[in-house]
Amino acid sequence: MTGAQMIAACSIAGSDSGGGAGIQADLKTFTALGIWGLTVITAVTAQNTREVRGTWMLPADAVRAQIGAVADDFTIGAWKTGMLGNAQNVRAVAEALPEGATLVIDPVMVSTSGHRLLEQDAVADLTGLLIPRAAIVTPNIPEAEVLAGMNVVTVEDMAEAGRRILDLGARAVVVKGGHLAGGAAVDLLVDPDGMMRLSGKRYPYSVHGSGCCFSAALTAYLAGGMPAREGFAAAREFIDTAIREAAGGPGPGRVVNPGGTIIHRH
């Protein structure tokens, strides 16, 4: 195709009607980082910043067809999975994803409001079919507990969980520590060379879509050729800005703001 200089990344995820997470957050993040965003939609959700009101899964054949369509026409520097929803879609992604693809897995399982976004029987397929192909897996604390089969209450637990997920076959794991108590938000990257720890400011409000935005930024940096550890540091800086500049009113809930730009009414 034309545009030889274009760097593309693809998000395989669900649609968020509120625009704060999922496909919409990923596309905003890719655009903010100068990456051409491609999408494979796995589900349509009816949601806003407070709740998920409904979820409708796309058939696995539709997921396969979308992956084939973009893979046939674009040079894709990195792929990201978010909400996959069920075992059929996990398998469809595993079958259709090009061999050797650079893959970031955000193992979306439950929404912040408690709505299940990955069926229980799909976890085994995720760990057996996709995680062994991942360049980086980016679980939050609850997701790390499921994948590692342990409770995570300290930074040391985060490191152990990261090592256990690494043993599933991923090349690197970023355990996001936003759910831990403490003055700073600590994230850990665990890879065969050891551990890299980054801390960021904890803000006094909740932000919808921060996990999607972080993993999309990481995907964008990998698509541009950055190594995992450098990409982790750059994505951590990017998400800190997106949370600090989060959009929303004076209430407790806000929406992640990739790139930190807000459109104001004149």
Image: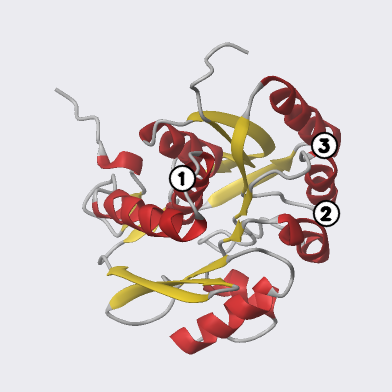
Expressed as whole percent of the image width and height from the top left, the position of residue 36 reads 50, 27
Q: Residue at x 81, y 34 (%)?
A: 64
In the rendered image, the residue lying farthest to the front is: 193
The answer to which image quadrant residue 56 occupies is top right
In the structure shown, which secondary structural element does the residue marked by tag 2 occupy? helix
Q: Residue at x 67, y 79 (%)?
A: 164
Mark 1 and mark 2: span between their CA atoms? 29 Å
Looking at the picture, does residue 110 appear above or below residue 92? below
In the structure shown, which secondary structural element does the residue marked by tag 3 occupy? loop
Nearer to the camera, 134 or 122: 134
Q: Are marks 3 and 1 in contact (CB under 8 Å)?
A: no
Nearer to the camera, 259 or 53: 259
Q: Are marks 3 and 2 in contact (CB under 8 Å)?
A: no
Earlier residue among tags 1 and 2: 2
Expressed as whole percent of the image width and height from the top left, the position of residue 79 reads 62, 42
In the rendered image, the residue lying farthest to the left is: 266
Visible in this render: residue 99? yes
Q: Which residue is mark 1?
A: 221
Q: Are marks 1 and 2 in contact (CB under 8 Å)?
A: no
Amino acid type, residue under disc 1 in the picture = Tyr
Judge from the rendering whether residue 39 lies leftward or rightward of residue 89; answer left or right.
left
